[in-house]
Image: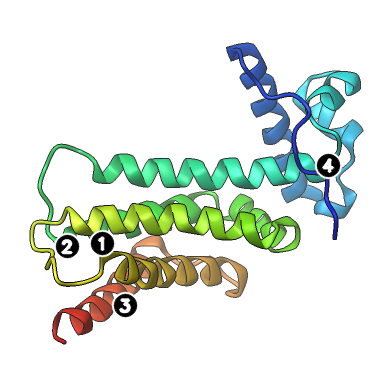
Amino acid sequence: MNLIVKPRRKPSQSRAWMTSGAIQDAFLLLLVEHGYEKVAMREIAAVAGVGLGTLYQYFPGKDSIAAVTVRARLRKLAATAAAAVTEPRSRTLEETVRVLAAVHIRTLLAQADEWRALLFLERRITPPEVYRELYKEFVYLFRNAFAAASDWRPTIDPERTAFHAFSIVDAMAQQALLVRDVCPDADELLRDVEGAVNGYLGSVFSR
């Protein structure tokens, strides 16, 4: 599937950023309400409050808006998690897991319909190389947070460990949205996720 995903105009001023953001928000609203196939560029322009010509100045088509929206939301999630673990305080590994998992779980479940729509869409439109790049951003975030934990053991490979730990968090969060008929309670899911990650880490530290 060959998609034209690069935006035509990269926002450089605050007004342009606001316009691009409004377009993405409008697309996401329509995506949740109608599904990807039924979202039209004219509808996106109307909901965003911009002219159709302006919309095409920013994006060549719906696929481009979709790709940028998915990447922007995922990078915002990563930035939120990074901010949560870079506060000036020391944390144990278990506390670090709790913070990272909480951001991931609570962010996705707080806007379950939007994230469900985006995650299904991501599987359809994201090229493998872009998917790997985004995934690595989260893995590196976990790696750096783990290595900074007060009880981290330097002999353990932080990147390998972070890869598996993030995979557990992300898979459990995504499948809770994509597979389960009813959105789970955030606290309940968070306890399960923490238990799974800490169980994995416990096995790594006991080797």
Location of residue 14 in the rendering, given as x and y in whole percent from the top left corner: 58, 13
Residue 143 horizontal side relative to residue 50, left or right: left
Q: Is residue 39 above or below residue 179?
A: above
Q: Quadrant of residue 142?
A: bottom left
Q: CA distance from mark 4 to mark 1?
A: 37 Å
Q: Residues within 10 Å of mark 2 (few under 14, many from 20)?
A: many
Q: Earlier in the sequence, mark 4 or mark 3?
A: 4
**Which residue is labeled 3 in the image?**
196
CB atoms of marks 4 and 1 within 8 Å: no
Q: Quadrant of residue 21?
A: top right
Q: Is residue 126 above or below residue 173?
A: above
CB atoms of marks 1 and 3 within 8 Å: no
Q: CA distance from mark 3 to mark 2?
A: 14 Å
At 67% from the left and 34% from the top, the residue drawn is 25
Q: Label 1 is placed on what type of residue?
A: Val
Give the numbered dot on residue 62. Answer: 4
Tag nearer the camera, 4 or 3? 4
Q: CA distance from mark 4 to mark 3?
A: 38 Å
**Which residue is labeled 1 in the image?**
97
At 75% from the left and 33% from the top, the residue drawn is 7
Q: Label 3 is placed on what type of residue?
A: Ala
Residue 48 horizontal side relative to residue 60, left or right: left
Give the quarter of the figure containing the C terminus. bottom left
Q: Earlier in the sequence, mark 4 or mark 1?
A: 4
CB atoms of marks 2 and 1 within 8 Å: yes
Q: Earlier in the sequence, mark 3 or mark 2?
A: 2
Give the numbered dot on residue 93. Answer: 2
Label 3 sits on a secondary structure element that is helix
